């Protein structure tokens, strides 16, 4: 029995201001819905530039309340209008001075389902994220949406297999990995790590990366957004490495069962032997 | 059973790296090949153990009578001995074989004679146990002859490899410096390899192929499976080299079913990969390989030279989804492929884009069956106008096709529509999407323009003006009919006075022998003129 859902990812370049950036994403949601997409995930910190190329507290202004901020509200009504599940990676302010790199998940009827806060925060040249974000404290939530069980794992998180596994154990069928990563730094890993995670945990992964060079630095974001299935095969083409692109793909969620019946990784894992992994 | 060391294994896919040592792909003779040499045959060789290992490569031939020969070997040697130091001591014989095995010798050849008149059973058993080919020579002959023969062949092979490498490199470099397109390079590679050559991007999408058509089609027919298996090294003769540079991988080259020895195939693939990387880096603003691949496919589809069915594997391999899809053939007159491709990506619509001859670009959308083709076409056309900032852009659309075989007819239909509106897009204030039904009489005449009856009709109706060398009268007639027989507008457009226009109209009517005030006669002349104009382009 197949269970096909149509899922979408959107990669784009910084337009220069927050409002036009939001409008570009609203249009993308409409374009996706016009093709029957039932779920759409945006890139990391979607309505802003990737300001972590510099350390400037002026960018704290980009943070909003989740779910009570204006952007979440705006996309809740869009989700309701279009009947589409939305994953919104954005800058969150819990209270002044307490900021997170977060993704909000909105169901197809516009209701707010919850958020995931990025757990692993990098601090390297061009990615000065510790300046802006506290490490996430949300654990590994999986959201029961209109299209299936969705998890989110943000950017740098992807280098850590533990979170991928935790999401799998919590029942995720698709994990979205919104990112901002640049040529030279990680390009050769980009098409290795998420497919490996998809195979190891036997679920679908949607990986999104922004495109272009922004004013704040030399980071050349290389896009190449894609979906990968539980057998680590790309679903259709990988997106452009330079231009904005909406990726719409049909995912057969029945494949999870098919692959898991064949490769019994969940049965054969040995948690009893993993104690040292959680030793501080 | 043990196998030979990995460095000399015949794994068919080894990732290409520029630093890959030559030693690992050094051409060698196999034990089996050595045994079939004429001089060796004269010694009446008999394989008495390890018959399953005869395809091992022989790197060198070594004559050794020492009992501790193992320590002198570095692996891959065929050891020749008379066993003179081993006779009479079975433990020593077994140990001798084991030391050869430990040293990873390729085979042992024992000349029967004074030391051993018959194959020694202890040695044979030891060799069989560790899978070391053991050969006995029933007729004594000088080992020097054998070493000379094998050694010179090995050297010749090594030289041949270097020479082939040089030949291929020189040929490819010459092509690159001459600015040859990708397919010329691939043709050259296919000529050397004698098997289909396929270039893919990272998503295994086929960008270009070369080789004999039927063989290439066989490869593409089942491309998904083939691509995955080739990656896993599952089939013999499939040699893969990665394409990339400056720390980035962007594709791969595959020799599909190379029939020569693996080492030579590896060498060809490596030279080819180097050349392709160079070609791409020097490519600059030239159309990308993806664009070239889409262009040759769409051009072949439109031309109808190759039946659509035969192009299906290429379309699938080029990344166009083809199973249970609705195909929407579109042609956009006067547009570049680049912005069209950009809008397709922005909307997430799967399709191919390619420039056709005559300043038009074709787009073949492939939509899931449940999507609304007309709505998405309109969406695409509207976004094309806003994204390119050209509000007069018109998308000529054919009716959606659900059968792949109907796609060429659809593309031709879209091209006809584009053709019919090409001149009049701005004048007629056309909608963003036009179809055959929107181009009315003009479209019909365009479709029929090659029909001999229509041609002779146009000739007949316009004969009086065409045989005359006054092109101005034809122009006046065209404007007069196009403006709905509006005399003042026609005079204005031709910058002549009303009386002057009347004189010209009279001349026209006189030459054609018609009365343009009569609706049917005017209509007839108008149709003839549209047909005439359509034939001129």
Image (cartoon, coloured by chain):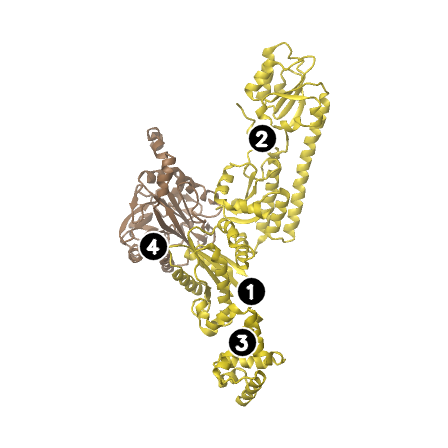
Q: Are marks 4 and 3 in contact (CB under 8 Å)?
A: no
Q: Within 10 angstroms of label 2, few (less than 14), some, or many (20 or more) residues? A: many
User: What x and y, as percent, mark residue B40?
Assistant: 69, 24
Point out the tag, 3 or 2, that comes first from the N-terminus.
2
Which chain is the one coloured brown? A
Report which residue position mark 3 lands on. Answer: B528
Horizontal and vertical percent position of residue B4: 56, 26
- Mark 2 in CB contact with mark 1 (< 8 angstroms): no
How many marks overall?
4
Tell me the mark number nearer the camera, choosing from 3 and 2.
Answer: 3
Q: Nearer the viewer, mark 4 or mark 1?
A: 1
Q: Is residue B491 above or below residue B535?
A: below
Q: Crowdedness of circle 1 by 10 Å Cα count: few (<14), some, many (20+)?
A: few
Q: Whole-Å distance between the Cαs marked 2 and 1?
A: 55 Å
The chain containing the residue under callout 1 comes to B
Residue B402 numbered mark, or none: none
- From the image, tell me which residue sits under label 4: A61
Mark identifier at residue B8: 2
The residue where tag 1 is placed is: B358
């Amino acid at each position: 029995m197949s269970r096909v859902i149509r899922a979408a990812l959107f990669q784009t370049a910084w337009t220069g201001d927050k409002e036009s950036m939001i409008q570009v994403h609203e249009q993308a949601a409409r374009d996706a819905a016009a093709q029957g997409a039932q779920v759409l995930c945006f890139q990391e910190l979607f309505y802003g530039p990737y300001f972590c190329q510099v350390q400037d507290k002026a960018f704290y202004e980009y943070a909003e309340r989740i779910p009570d901020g204006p952007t979440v509200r705006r996309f809740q009504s869009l989700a309701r209008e279009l009947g589409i599940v939305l994953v919104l990676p954005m800058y969150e302010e819990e209270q002044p001075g307490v900021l997170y790199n977060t993704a909000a998940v909105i169901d197809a009827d516009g209701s707010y389902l919850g958020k995931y806060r990025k757990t692993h925060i990098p601090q390297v040249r061009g990615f000065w994220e510790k300046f802006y974000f506290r490490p996430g404290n949300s654990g590994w939530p999986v959201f029961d949406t209109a299209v299936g069980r969705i998890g989110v794992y943000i950017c740098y998180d992807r280098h850590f297999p533990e979170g991928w596994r935790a999401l799998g154990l919590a029942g995720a069928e698709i994990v979205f990995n919104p990112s901002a990563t640049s040529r030279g730094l990680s390009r050769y890993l980009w098409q290795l790590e998420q497919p490996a995670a998809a195979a190891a945990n036997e679920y679908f992964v949607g990986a999104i990366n922004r495109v272009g060079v922004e004013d704040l630095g030399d980071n050349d974001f290389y896009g190449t957004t894609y979906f990968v299935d539980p057998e680590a095969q790309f679903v259709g083409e990988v997106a452009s490495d330079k231009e904005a692109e909406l990726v719409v793909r049909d995912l057969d969620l029945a494949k999870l069962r098919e692959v898991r019946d064949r490769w019994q990784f969940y049965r054969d894992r040995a948690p009893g032997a993993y104690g040292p992994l959680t030793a501080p | 059973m043990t196998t030979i060391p990995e460095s000399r294994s015949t794994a068919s896919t080894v990732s290409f790296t520029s630093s890959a040592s030559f030693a690992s792909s050094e051409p060698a003779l196999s034990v089996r090949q050595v045994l079939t040499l004429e001089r060796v045959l004269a010694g009446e060789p008999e394989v008495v153990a390890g018959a399953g290992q005869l395809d091992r490569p022989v790197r060198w031939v070594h004559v050794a009578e020492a009992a501790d020969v193992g320590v002198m070997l570095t692996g891959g040697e065929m050891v020749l001995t008379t066993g003179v130091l081993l006779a009479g001591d079975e433990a020593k014989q077994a140990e001798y074989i084991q030391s050869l095995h430990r040293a990873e010798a390729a085979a042992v050849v024992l000349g029967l004679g004074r030391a051993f008149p018959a194959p020694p059973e202890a040695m044979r058993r030891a060799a069989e146990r560790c899978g070391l080919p053991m050969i006995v020579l029933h007729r004594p002959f000088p080992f020097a002859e054998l070493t000379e023969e094998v050694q010179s062949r090995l050297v010749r092979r090594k030289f041949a490899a270097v020479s082939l490498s040089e030949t291929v490199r020189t040929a490819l470099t010459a092509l690159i410096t001459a600015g040859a397109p990708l397919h010329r390079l691939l043709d050259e590679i296919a000529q050397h390899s004698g098997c289909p050559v396929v270039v893919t991007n990272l998503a295994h999408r086929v960008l270009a192929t070369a080789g004999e058509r039927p063989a290439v089609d066989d490869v593409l027919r089942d491309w998904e499976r083939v691509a995955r298996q080739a990656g896993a090294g599952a089939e013999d003769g499939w040699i893969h080299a990665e394409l990339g540079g400056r720390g980035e991988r962007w594709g791969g080259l595959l020799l599909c079913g190379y029939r020569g020895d693996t080492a030579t195939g590896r060498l060809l693939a490596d030279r080819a990969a180097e050349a392709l990387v160079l070609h791409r880096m020097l490519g600059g603003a030239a159309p990308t390989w993806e664009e070239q691949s889409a262009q040759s496919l769409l051009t072949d589809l439109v031309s109808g030279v190759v039946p659509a069915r035969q192009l299906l594997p290429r379309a699938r391999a080029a990344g166009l989804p083809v199973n249970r899809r609705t195909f929407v053939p579109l042609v956009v007159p006067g547009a570049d492929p680049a912005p069209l491709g950009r809008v397709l990506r922005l909307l997430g619509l799967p399709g191919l884009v390619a420039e056709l001859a005559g300043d038009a670009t074709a787009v073949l959308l492939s939509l899931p069956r449940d999507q609304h083709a007309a709505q998405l076409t309109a969406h695409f056309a509207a976004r094309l106008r806003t994204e390119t900032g050209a509000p007069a852009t018109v998308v000529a659309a054919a009716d959606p096709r659900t059968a792949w075989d109907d796609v060429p007819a659809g593309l031709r239909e879209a091209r006809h529509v584009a053709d019919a509106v090409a001149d009049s897009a701005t004048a007629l204030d056309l909608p963003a999407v036009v179809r055959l039904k929107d181009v009315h009489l003009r479209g019909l005449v365009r479709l029929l323009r090659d029909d001999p009856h229509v041609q002779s009709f146009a000739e007949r109706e316009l004969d009086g003006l065409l045989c005359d060398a006054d092109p101005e009268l034809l122009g006046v007639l065209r404007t007069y009919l196009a403006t709905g027989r509006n005399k003042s507008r026609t005079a204005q457009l031709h910058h002549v006075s009303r009386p002057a226009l009347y004189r010209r109209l009279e001349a026209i009517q006189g030459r054609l022998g018609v009365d343009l005030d009569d609706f049917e006669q005017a209509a007839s002349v108008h149709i003839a003129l549209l047909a005439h104009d359509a034939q001129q382009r």
